[in-house]
Image: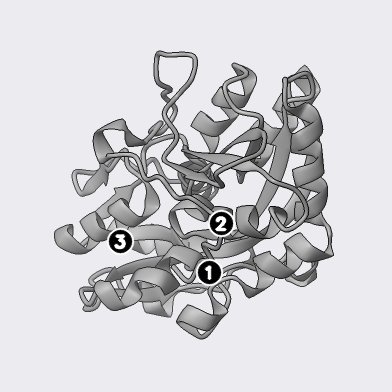
Amino acid sequence: MGLRHRNTVLLVAAAGLACVAGGSAAADSAPMAAAVYGSSGPVLRLATGSPGELGLVGELAVRFSDQEPIRLEWHKAGSGAALELLKQGRVDLVMVHAPAAETAAVAEGWAARHTPIGGNAYYLVGPTDDPAGIRASADALDALRRIASTGSRFLSRGDQSGTHRRELALWAEAGISPDWPGYSESSDFMAASLRRAEAEGAYFLTDNSTWVALQNELPGLERLYSGDPRLLNAYHALLAPDGPSAALADRFLRFLEGPDGQAVVRDFGRAQFGAPLYLDAAALQREP
């Protein structure tokens, strides 16, 4: 994934141990990390989904370690599950994209330092023959109405992740209850769900970062609709204000929102894919 490993140690947990999937969490008080970056220094536990899958978390850990030693544990979790881990004190920091849940977490007092860190956009992808004709859609809501009215296959994350919550909000705005026979749920993360959508010939709401990284592996899918401002996807970081690593989490967050961290965000993926996978916070705010 183009990461500089230097003195970084990456330990990838086996799939059976891997993930805190969807809105659920492991029963033990110290969930297994999907990966660990760094071989020395204090431990920082960070939960997020696609930014970890694509390698952004690892690159941020490497760059932060230029300032001070750190052993960063990445806990693989969608936004709903990541926030639950933060609430339970099982991680120190999250990178999430579920605005209403983020606002509630701060209001309830168990999350703090709600900080924009960048983001991306969503695409509607689907079979190359586009049976619902969404290429001609006027906007994202029109695209969803075309999918529903034709009874086309649509795969949902179905896991209370940020993507799933955005999808449900779009269906609601379109005035549609997604309950026709062709609508199904993966209860899985973005990359796995994209592969399943291709296998099933289904439409799917994906973030552009994962799509850019995987599109060459998915010849049966095509980006069919994008560009609606409704599809912008902002990520924020939050920390546990009373956690044992609150000071370290705050230093990492200050790095992430500062010039060095934002440079990592806006350049990540450029060398490997020819274009960055994320917008930094300033660029995202300039989008319409």
Looking at marks 2 and 1 on the same chain, the residue that comes earlier in the sequence is marked by 2
Q: CA distance from mark 1 to mark 3?
A: 16 Å
Quarter where residue 106 is shown: top right
Looking at marks 2 and 3 on the same chain, the residue that comes earlier in the sequence is marked by 2
Q: Amino acid at mark 2?
A: Asn
In this view of the protein, can residue 151 be seen by the observer? no
Task: Look at mark 3 in the image and give the residue it sits on.
Answer: 203
Q: CA distance from mark 2 to mark 3?
A: 42 Å
The circle on residue 125 is none
Helix, strand or loop for disc 2: loop
The reply, left or right, for residue 229 in relation to residue 11 is right
Using the image, determine if residue 157 lies above or below residue 104. below
Task: State the residue at coordinates (70%, 43%).
Answer: 237
* 2 and 3 marks in contact (CB < 8 Å): no
Which residue is more in the foreground, 225 or 113?
113
In this view of the protein, can residue 103 be seen by the observer? yes
Visual colour scheme: one colour
Give the total of numbered labels. Answer: 3
Percent from the top left, x then y, of residue 284? Answer: 73, 66
Quarter where residue 45 is shown: top right
Q: Residues within 10 Å of mark 1 (few under 14, many from 20)?
A: some
Residue projecting furthest to the bottom: 274
Q: Residues within 10 Å of mark 2 (few under 14, many from 20)?
A: few
Q: Residues within 10 Å of mark 3 (few under 14, many from 20)?
A: many
